[in-house]
Image (tube, grey):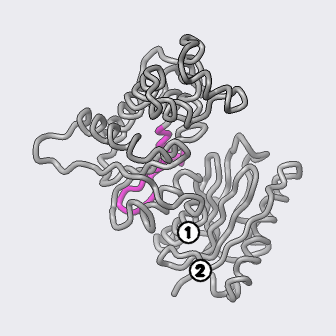
Amino acid sequence: MKHYVGIDLGGTNIKAGVINEAGEIISRASIKTRTSGGQMDIVLDMGRLASQVTEEAGLKQSDICAIGVGSPGTPDNITGTLIYANNLPFLHVPIRSGIRQIFDKPVYVDNDANVAALAESVAGAAQGTSHSVTITLGTGVGGGVVINRRIYSGFNNAGCEIGHIVIKSGGESCTCGRCGCFEVYASATGLIRETEKAALSHPDSLLNILIKQNEGKADGQTAFIGMRQGDPVAADVVAFYIEMLAEGLANVINGYMPEVIAIGGGISNEGDALLEPVREKAIARSYLGEGVAKPRIVLARMGNQAGIVGAAMMAANCLEDGLPG
């Protein structure tokens, strides 16, 4: 059985694990990300953590085939460099050479959303498929695309920014500089914005009571809770959210025609209350003729394991494809 180390680099924590070729976790550990230090401190910490989880799995460095790193930002997997990450002190960071100072095995780097998508493809909701898309509904809208069981991110590793497909021309401003992006409406941030706007314009709505009970703030659950308790204003907020999510998913289907779209992130915890109407609307709006096989829209399954499993599987693919590490 072949073994790989997967590293999930985040702004708060670094997680790592030893993963076998079936996508199973053998050992795992995490440490705080030392964002107050220099960028190489973080890279060397990743190398040390890779050594730690290898020892805890009862293995030696020689038993590990390769190391994969999933990170926010834009990677260059040819040179093993992270070009840029806006929530880390990273600019043109030599991740490969830094980790290899401590753990001398091939090292590969990719975007965290991409490796999460690969994890769902290998061991999660899209297991057994060749073409899938994973979308995370969190603070923003993250997306990863897998084509022929490989991550696809364009010629410059910066593609598949699904959150920045415009679904409402002239709509709300997005942090990317455009207006009406998928992320603006389908993220938890967008849902919270619409919930608070509705509460403000309807002072008799149950939303105001729910917000008051939640320390004066709406969250991604507030509108759904209000809807379930029969509040028509909350129901309108949820209906608008589902419309926008379905519009974006129809664009994803038309662009990639994946066998599976896996939906993750905090909003996905609403389960069928979210997915059933979204499935119906998204499929109805997609370019799918009579008799054409239709994508499945399902809940993502990998959760917090997606980063380390996907990073390891990405490294396995890179090694198999003969990429230098």
9 vs 220, left or right, is right
Disc 2 target residue: 65
Residue 154 on the magenta span: yes
Position of residue 267 measured from the top left corner of the image (x, y, whole percent):
51, 42
Asked whether disc 1 touches disc 2, contact meaning CB atoms under 8 Å apart, the reply is yes
Position of residue 274 measured from the top left corner of the image (x, y, whole percent):
41, 40
Position of residue 122 measured from the top left corner of the image (x, y, whole percent):
43, 67
At 74% across and 49% down in the image, what residue appears? 11
At 64% across and 46% down in the image, what residue appears? 73
Magenta-colored span: 143-162
Q: Secondary structure at mark 1?
A: helix
User: Can residue 297 be seen by looking at this rendering?
Assistant: yes
Q: Quadrant of residue 235?
A: top left
Disc 1 target residue: 315
Residue 69 on the magenta span: no
Q: Is residue 134 above or below residue 183?
A: below
Give amino acid for label 2.
Answer: Cys
At 61% across and 47% down in the image, what residue appears? 74
Q: CA distance from mark 1 to mark 2?
A: 9 Å
